[in-house]
Amino acid sequence: MTQTQFPSGSEAPLFSIIIPTYKVQAFLRDCLDSVLDQSFQSYELLVVDDCSPDGCGEIIDDYAKADPRVVAIHLEKNVGLGQARNVGMARARGTYLLFLDSDDTMLPGSLQAMAERIKETSSPDLLVFDYARTHWDGRVTPNSRADVLTEAPHGTFSLKDQPELLNLLQVAWNKAYRRDFIEQWGFEYPSGYYEDTPWTYPVLIAAETIAALPRVCVYYRQRRQGSILHSTSRKHFDVFAQYDLVFKFLADNPQFAEWQGILYERMVNHFRVVEVSPGRLPDDARAEFRQCWAEADRKHRPQGHPVAKTKAQMIPAKHRDKARTAVRSLKRKKSVPTKLKRKLRKRLLKAYYRAQRMLPVQKDVAVFAAYWNGSYACNPAAVHEKMRELAPGMKAVWVLKDGATSQPPKGTPTVHPGSFGFWKAMARGKYFVNNVNFPQSVVKRPGQVYLQTHHGSPLKRMGVDLAEYPVGRRGMNLTRLMDRVDRWDYSLTSNSFSTAAWDRAYPSYYEPLEYGYPRNDQLVNASAADVAAARRKLGVAEGTKVILYTPTHRDYHDAPKQMLDLERFALTVGSEFTVMVRAHYFYNQSLLASGTSGSARLVDVSTYPSVEELYLAADCLLTDYSSVMFDYANLDRPIVIYANDWEVYRVTRGTYFDITVDSPGLTVQNEAELLDIFTSGRWNSAESDAARASFRQKFCEFDDGRAAERVVRKVFLGQDEVPPVLPIGEHPVPPRPEQCGQQAPQPRDRETV
């Protein structure tokens, strides 16, 4: 984050940039950083927290503490976008006002370009600049009316000279406004939807001097969900009151009467867009909307001006017939499978699946899967265990492929992926729990409920955030991914950071469950006996320190590659340590060339069935960018980060934060430093403790040991009142191994571990 001071202390800045915020924690940091990283320095950043129920307020305060240009403004109640902007304007000191929506970003060099253009044109009332749309799948599309700016007069002009400005998207954030001009006219934003309309039209009409900057300065984020334009609500009726304000401005200022005709046409076009846009108006409100439209038409149509045609009237009959035929044809095509399978079994499976979907959903059946059907593990397994306890009437079915590394409790039905049993379960089950996704060809039926548990907190970029990282995306079809995400009803998170990350990585309409990760209940609730038992099972000698090494997958590597000379490491740290190595689950081969080196133990635990027992047995976690660090931090034990290829990793995969800054412990970038940390004893020090405390505060937020119970009560039992999450300071913390009085282990062959 840039922390450059204003060039002069009390002098007013050139720009006051006003950013209202509400439920945008997933995008707010990008927005603020895009401003604070600008090369031009003469500005203040007024960030208005419109009583946002998520983490926006905390984010704003963090930025305000770190940078004096950021002014945090917290409202006591939610007032809406327009009123929040007014609050920011009342605090503004700048010569010009700029507005930026909190999920959009400002392009580098934009403020500098605006400042230069303002100087060239002798401080006009308005400066209008260009923008581009950014889409969830990585596409960037230009403003379709950019020609309005490129063809504008080079110097200053008025709306009469370039009336095409009224054809631009009427928003607040594509203009810089001279503050004394706004104050002279007393312009303010109204409340309600479409609040930009009675602001933008009067401002354009009243401005005596306008300048154009044909440069893209703002990226306008097109969200898959969360925009009012995609919400079904009667609030869309606000559009009528907003145009009443527009025409009141004209009535109060008769010198602008010449604009009545064109604004009437713009009004009718706006009404038409609201009416025909899918999902805006409730179905039972359409007749009323047309009545309000007719009333507005009677009030605001200039005398002698022809009545504007409706959308249907504007399309010739023959074209309407063609359109209807095309729609019917498209609907027929969508109901037919895209390709007939050649093999009889596949045809039979499809027919069987369709037939099963005609039968009732079985309300007492829950289908579970984890890690692409590879094991009985992770959050789904923990949820299943708690479901057996709290909802014994529920029947579980697990999807497991051949060679699965672990199995569910005895008596639990299992089905092979793609089998007749699998398709019956997918067709008839009511609940579906997975830490990845079920196949693309699965059809979600009405009444079925999908819980996405995820399988880690995200350091690396995920989902549609990989659009800009082709190495990390590896050909992933983001559209197909989002089709699967749209099946989710619930998304489980273990901290508010993850809630925001999933919101931007998987933009859809699911409900976030900030309950914690069920798999971590076992860690948080572990006793001294559990820790001692885990070490006995692993054959750890009493008095030995265990380092658990868990490197993650590299997208820029096609095969596992040793990032650390493990034999040298184990030999150097000495015989007091046992180094247990667990390869990433993507790989089916060991990272070790041999089992033992010198007097230190070096053990491969890649196939050990319970990673939670490995955590409990370990004195220290050594990892790089693996999400295991977030789980292990619940134990409040030392963590060391070996980030020898950090810059390559963050460039190829993309990350949500800098692990070398927000680290759970000591971070090193070469083997010499790593060896020194362990030989000197710094791995377990006050420095390490301080870093871990901050990390736990942020990333162990909801893991208080009752996550699975919350999930079962909410999802399977339908209880809205679930046990509240305890503050982090009240979370149980299991004892460390040295506090557990371990009994002597039984003799054990290392190869069986």
Image: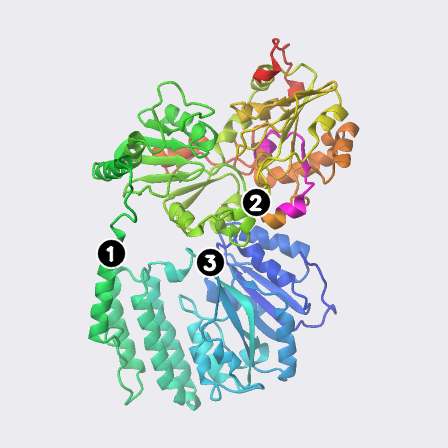
- Please tell me whether mark 1 sits on a helix, a strand or a loop: helix
Q: Amino acid at mark 3?
A: Asn
Image quadrant for the N terminus?
A: bottom right
Q: Which residue is mark 3?
A: 78
Q: CA distance from mark 3 to mark 2?
A: 33 Å
Q: Which residue is mark 1?
A: 331
Pick the front one: 44 or 401? 401
Image quadrant for the C terminus?
A: top right
Place of residue 678 in the rendered image (x, y in percent of width and height, measured from the top left) = 75, 29
Pick the front one: 427 or 389? 427
Give the label, 3 or 2, closer to the camera: 2
- Colouring of the image: rainbow
Q: Which residue is mark 2?
A: 460
Q: Quadrant of residue 3?
A: bottom right
Place of residue 60 in the rendered image (x, y in percent of width and height, measured from the top left) = 59, 55
Q: Amino acid at mark 2?
A: Lys
Residue drawn at point x = 78 percent, y = 32 percent: 676
246 left or right, relative to 545: left
- Please tell me whether mark 3 sits on a helix, a strand or a loop: loop
Place of residue 107 in the rendered image (x, y in percent of width and height, measured from the top left) = 59, 65
Please give the range of residues in magenta: 631-649
Up-down: is 570 above or below 671? above
Pick the front one: 738 or 254? 738
Based on the picture, tell me whether residue 689 belongs to the magenta stretch.
no
Up-down: is 255 above or below 730? below
Give the label, 2 or 1, closer to the camera: 1
